[in-house]
Image: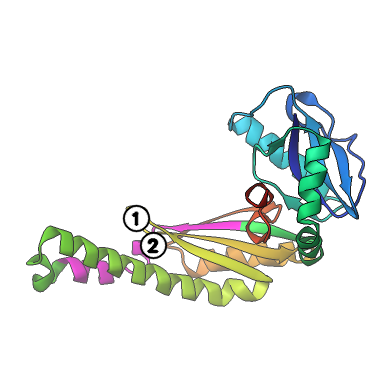
Amino acid sequence: MLYVYGVVDSPSFDGTSVKGHDGASVFAVPCGDCAAAASSLSRRMIAPSPRSVWLHQQVLDVLMQRHAVLPLRFATIVPDEGVLRDRLRSIHRALADDLRRLRGKVEFALRVTNIHAECPHARDAERKDDATQALPPGTRYLRERIASEDTARRIERALRRHLDPAAEHAVWALATTRAPTLTASYLVERNEVSSFVATVVDVRARHPALDVSCTGPWAPYSFVTVRAPEAW
């Protein structure tokens, strides 16, 4: 079995400085002008423990130092090199397009919580309104949820006015949790990382009531158009 970490923009790479799962060497499985980064695996699955997930990311981090990388989903496993080459060949053109588009770029992940602290009066007014309190519980819940989502979207627009100009592309989402939570993925040029981080710091200062977490740089998971495991 082969565990596959990602696809790089070269038919070969130096994998001597990185070890994959079970301490196995990471090697290239070439397909045209790109290659999959893989390591041999004596089992048919990898459990998603913190250590194994972090090891997957470490392999990608090393490859990203010299190559454009399309990260594959954790626990992508194929039977052998022949099968892997066939599957790469079937989506080679799309992979090549993604590699060109994402070369020199990384991803940052943002998570925004404590949203109601930014607009406490709006929520208090909604809760104290006599007409709202007279509604059935289910209807009242739906109205409060819509109001929460509207508040979250207003905050998203306010944050994006500052963050979007510092990045090439962004994907935002509103998590359907009990408390509204905004998540975002930002595609940033590697040489603009310091500028983007400074912008996040500025956004935190402008909105001290919000809890804005930022992690990265990561391989650009959210901006790969071809999801190899699904395409296969």
Residue at mark 2: 115
Q: Which amino acid does the dot numbered 2 rest on?
A: Ile
The alpha-carbon separation of the residues under discs 1 and 2 comes to: 8 Å
Query: Left or right: where does residue 141 sit relative to residue 223?
Result: left
Tag 2: Cα neighbours inside 10 Å, few (<14), some, or many (≥20)?
many
Q: Which percent across, then down, holds residue 169?
A: 65, 70
Which residue corresponds to the image point at 67% horizontal and 61% vertical from the top-left?
Answer: 225
Range of magenta residues: 109-127
Q: Which percent across, then down, holds residue 223?
A: 66, 61
Q: Is residue 108 above or below residue 195?
A: above
Q: Which amino acid does the dot numbered 1 rest on?
A: Ala
Residue at mark 1: 179
Q: Is residue 62 visible?
A: no
Which residue corresponds to the image point at 90% horizontal and 53% vertical from the top-left?
Answer: 32
Q: Which percent across, then down, holds residue 83?
A: 78, 39
Which residue corresponds to the image point at 51% horizontal and 71% vertical from the top-left?
Answer: 159
* Residue 107 magenta-highlighted: no
Q: Closer to the N terminus: mark 1 or mark 2? A: 2
Q: Secondary structure at mark 2?
A: helix
Quadrant in which residue 136 is drawn = bottom left
Which residue corresponds to the image point at 80% horizontal and 60% vertical from the top-left?
Answer: 99
Badge 1 vs badge 2, beta-carbon distance below 8 Å: yes
Residue closer to the observer: 51 or 85: 85
